[in-house]
Amino acid sequence: MDAFRAFLNQHDEPAWDGVLADLEPSLHPVDREATRIWFGFWPLKLRRLLRETTDEAATAQEYLLDGRYRLEHQLDESVDFLYGSIYWDRVKEALLQRSESASEQTLEGLGSEIRKLADGVAARLKVEASLLLGISAVGFMAFQQVGAPPFRNGSASGPSRTRRPKPGKILKQRARTTSQGLFGFLRTVNRRFTVRFDESKRDATFSCIEGQDLSSASAGDERDYKTRDHRCIAGPIPAECRVASCGYCWIGVLSGRENIIEVSAHERRRLNYFGYLDSSSHDETHPVIRLACQSKCYGDVTVVVPPWNGSLDGRR
Ligand code: FES
C-alpha cells in the first residue's frame, strides 16, 4: 500500500471526529452542516463492513443494507449537495497529486494535510479557503475509503456542479420562510411550510402542514421517484414502517434543524440502533441526521436523502 493510503488508514472514527471538530469553526457556513451530513452518510464502519465481507449478498442481508451503499459507484454524485462540489474536480486532482508525492517524511497531521490542500486549491482559484475546507475533508475521507481509482475517473460535471448561486444567496434562501398569504399572521392552524430536498433543482420541494412528519408530507408528493430509487415507494424520501422501525427514512438536515421537533428518546435510540448518529450528535436536541417519520415539522427545512439505508450497529 502506498504511503498516502497507509497514512490515511491510521485514522479511525475517533481520530476523524477530532479532526472534524478542529476544522468545523473554519468551515464556511454554507457547507458546515453539509460536511457533517456527508460524513454521516458515508461512515468508516460501512466501508469496514464491505471490505471485510467475503459474501456481499449475505452481509447486505445481515445488516439490512438496501439502496446504493457503495461509495465508489457514486463518488462524484455523493458530493453534489455540498456547495464545495463546484471545486470537486480540482480537489480530486490535488488529492491525486498529493497521494503520488507523499512520503512518510513529508506527511503531516491529517488536519494540516486537509488545510494545506484546501489552501492550495483556494489560492489557485482565488476563492476563500473556508469554501474548500469541507469538500477537501470529504475528499480525504473518500480517498481513505475507496483509494485512487475512482478519483482518476473524470467527473460528470452536471449543471448542479458547475452553476450554483453565490454562498450568501444560498444562505439567504435557506433562511427564507414560506409566506402564509396576506393574512397569514392570523392563521393559527394548517400553516404550510416548504421542504426542499435538492437545492440544485427549483422544483425539488414538497409542502408540509404544521406538525406533520416529514415522511407523511413526502408521501403527498405524487411524482415518480421509484424509477430512480426503488426505496421511494411514495414521495422522494424512502419509507416503509413510519414508526422508526425500519431505518429507511433517514435524512440529513441541511437547514432548518430548529424547525423540526426535538429528537425524542425513542428516535435517538433508533438512530443509534441503525448506526446513523455521529459522535457529536449524541447530546444534540436537533441532530443533523433524523428519521423523517419522527420529524414533525414547524417551519421550512432543507434536507438531503441518502442513497442507502441499513442497520450497522443494531445487528452486531
Ligand atoms: S419509515 Fe421506517 S424508520 Fe421511518
Image (cartoon, rainbow, N blue to C red):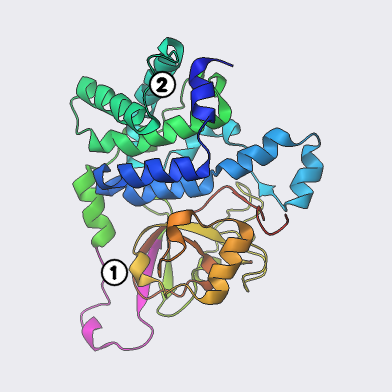
Tell me where residue 120 appears, x and y as whole percent: 26, 22
**Overall secondary structure of the magenta stretch?**
loop
Residue annotated with mark 2: 95
Quick one: quadrant of the N terminus?
top right
Quick one: quadrant of the C terminus?
bottom right
Q: Secondary structure at mark 1?
A: loop
Q: Amino acid at mark 1?
A: Thr
Tell me where residue 33 appears, x and y as whole percent: 36, 52
CA distance separating discs 1 and 2: 41 Å
Tell me where residue 159 appears, x and y as whole percent: 37, 35
Residue annotated with mark 1: 178
Label located before the other in sequence (1 or 2): 2
Residue 184 in magenta stretch? yes
- Ligand 1 in which quarter: bottom right
Is 120 displayed left or right of 109 in the figure? left
Instruction: Write the residue at 29% across / 33% down.
Output: 132
Mark 1 Cα within 10 Å, few/some/many (few <14, many 20+)? some
Q: Which residues are magenta?
A: 176-195
Name the residue furthest front. 105
Q: In the rendered image of this protein, does residue 78 appear above or below residue 223?
A: above
Q: Amino acid at mark 2?
A: Leu
Mark 2 Cα within 10 Å, few/some/many (few <14, many 20+)? many
User: Which is nearer the eye, 20 or 57?
Assistant: 20
Label 2 beta carbon within 8 A of ligand 1: no
Label 1 beta carbon within 8 A of ligand 1: no
Instruction: Write the residue at 57% across / 36% down.
Output: 71
Tell me where residue 74 appears, x and y as whole percent: 55, 34
Is 144 displayed left or right of 65 in the figure? left
